[in-house]
Image: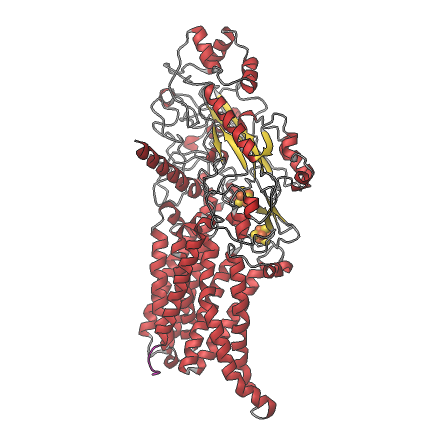
Amino acid sequence: MVPRTVAPNSFAGRLDDPAANAGYEAPPPRKGFFTDTSVCIGCKACEVACKEWNMVPEDGIDLLGMSYDNTGGLGADSWRAVAFIEQSRPIGRGTPAFDGTTTGGSSDALQQDVVAAGIDVFEEASRLGTALPGGTPIADAAAAATGASGGCGCGSGGGGCGSAPAAAAATTTTAAPASEQFLGMPGMLAPAPLPDREGRQDVRWLMMSNVCKHCTHAACLDVCPTGALFRTEFGTVVVQQDVCNGCGYCVSACPYGVIDKREGDGRAWKCTLCYDRLGNDETPACAKACPTESIQYGDLDELRERAEARRQQLHDVGVTEARLYGEDPDDGVGGDGAFFLLLDEPEVYGLPPDPVVTTRDLPSMYKHMAVAAGAMVLGALVSGLGRRS
Amino acid sequence: MNTPGSPTEGAFERDPHPDADPRRTQNQEPHPAHQGGQSHHDPLGGQAARMWGAGMGRRDGAAVDAPGGPDGGKPRRRGGRRRRGDPNAVVPDAEFRSYYGRPVLKRPVWTHDIAYYLFSGGLAAGSSMLALVADARGDATARRNLRLTSLTAVGASAYFLIIDLGKPERFYNMLRVAKVTSPMSVGTWILTGFGPLCGAAAVFEGAVLLPQRGVWGLARTLARPAASVAGAGAALFAPLLATYTAVLFADTAVPSWHEPYRELPFVFAGSALASGAGAGMLLSPVAQAVPARRAAVLGATLELVAAHRMENEHGLVSEPFRIGRPGKFLRAARALTAAGAVGAVLGRRSRVVSAAAGACLLTGSFLTRMAVFEAGITSVEDPKYVVVPQRERVAARDAAAATASA
Ligand code: SF4
Ligand code: SF4
């Protein structure tokens, strides 16, 4: 279990088989998660299933008052956490929300276009879900069918293009009556029927089920002074609860802010990728519970291929903001065992845009420490020079 | 240092828990002028817009209309959102996006005990090195007092280290493993080597209390050389004890601990030497404090120079060392350390000046440790310290790739 030799690439860089690097002979293929956020519906079945299976305690029933996400993020008592983001954004590619007018071509018009063109959006969606690449964005199809204008040319980068000039021109709204004052509670309806204060209804929801990344170079594991954190034969990273003494080093080391110390218990906890289920050839609880296959479990190699195909598929139908996160074995942590397909920049989901395992710089840190220690010795020697007065 | 109405201050709701951070709340009361329906450019729309409309999370005096914002018809800026930054920011607010302003990283679970540990470990190391110097020079009072200081400090270190564990009774689990990839494991072993030697050197000082005759007399005679050997052994571990804590902090994802990893060992080495020297000046007669005074000047200089780099060379990540509580601590530390060094030079004849300078150095060293500890905490509480430098890294890489392919 304990690595006998420290391979030269143990600190950082590409490492294709972390289990073998950790000393396992002929380990099974590396396992992981591919979380495709484009099909996540935010149902939180994964959160519940994870808690149930792993007997993770309740962590406070809070209303955070920011969105439908009241979990707030990963922690010792939340090993899966569904992020929820609401954004203004034109539907489909190249359809400015307020194109050409002060109020602009709102999504009302767009929806009317879609209806007028006789497009069955559900069919479109299912075609996208299963068919080959090559679909057409609904909005474009609708625009083509009805001859409406479109195309502001913005695409990737997420967040959507919009209409600040239009909004600026319309800054004459009078003060809202006190009775309408919004108190920060999520509404009961989807945002579409509720125009925002500028009358726009073009809103999108992003949802992402976050989880421990099971890094190829796991900082938490590297810095653990008790050996409580270890690499399993599946290439995942697990805490041995009977060894952890709650020093908390792993908490500060994780570049994703995943692992945390449990209140009242004192030890560090995080996702185990259902190590007990894996050992019995079972799918982890969250992946099993996910109704939309947003969470896909399997051999990492295969998942990476699947994810790239999905990204390509989405690009082909105009979802150019789709990008993979954590799939690259050459990134700062050597690639994640659990990686994602995102529809906006990682930081929008609370993920670091370019994480690097801190131990990459450890050899240099030790070198600097040695020189500083030498300087101290020198200082003491110089201080002691000369005869007593 | 918030610049009211600054046009770069693209205000946006971000802190769903205004109570969670008292530092932020003052400026976050909904501003009457922004209450209700005043129309602003809306960075997110929908839910966030309604919260925005209700004045939630808005910062006093912040300019709310970011010209050419993300909804602009013009080419979009990358990332496209304006975020306001820290109210104490001394550099213009960085633009970045985040998940409702929530931290990306976990707040270190270490408490101030760890800051105290940094100080006491450094003091133990510095004083045991100077005890060896005093021993070599035959400065008996200085030697004795430094050895006792060192023992007290290392005892305090072990105490702070262990009570900060979530399961203190499992401390021994660290003694079952030795891992170079874990600076904490390395440090545990350094402390395990240093502690008993330092303790022995101090305890043997007590031999003077034994009777001069018989078996006790023999023990009394042997105690001197034994103490010297133990003290020399401790002094061998001491520089490692003083500097490994820098690696301990640097080997984390915490931006303001990790980024200055080249300077931190020197800050801690200088601080440890200065604090040991401070103890020496405080506790020895001036005639025996010559090495302490020299060490004070050397240690203080090293600490000040390295801390200056740490405070200025790392762009945004250096900012926590200048603002808020860590900034105050570091400024006070700098003043006290400098005063201590000056006092060390001037206090050649005066016991009082020498002792006062020693006290300044000790306090300065303590505050330096507190500043480093708290700067790290500040740098994880605001996601900008994580997101902005990483974004810059990505942008630099993209630019390099673009030029390479062009
Ligand atoms: S460093 Fe963080 S994300 Fe990576 S394996 Fe450890 S806890 Fe998971
Ligand atoms: S808290 Fe536990 S798992 Fe984390 S580094 Fe310390 S001993 Fe290891």
Residue at the far bottom in the pictured view: B213
Answer with the quarter of the image where residue B38 lies: top left
Colour theme: secondary structure
For residue A107, above or below residue B101: above
Answer with the quarter of the image where residue A100 lies: top left
For residue B381, above or below residue A283: below
Q: Taken as a whole, is the magenta stretch helix, strand or loop?
A: loop
Expressed as whole percent of the image width and height from the top left, the position of residue B357 reads 37, 70
Name the residue rendered at 42%, 60% in the picture: A369
Quick check: A189 left or right of B338?
A: right
Quick check: A43 left or right of B92?
A: right
Residue at the far front in the pictured view: A26
For residue A179, above or below residue B279: above
Name the residue rendered at 47%, 50% in the picture: A8
Residue A386 falls inside the magenta stretch: yes
Q: Can residue A304 be seen in this view?
A: yes
Expressed as whole percent of the image width and height from the top left, the position of residue A368 reads 40, 58
Region of the chain picked out in magenta, as a range: A385-389
Q: Which of B90 and A337 is in front in this view?
A: A337
Answer with the quarter of the image where residue A78 lies: top right
Q: Is residue B293 visible?
A: no
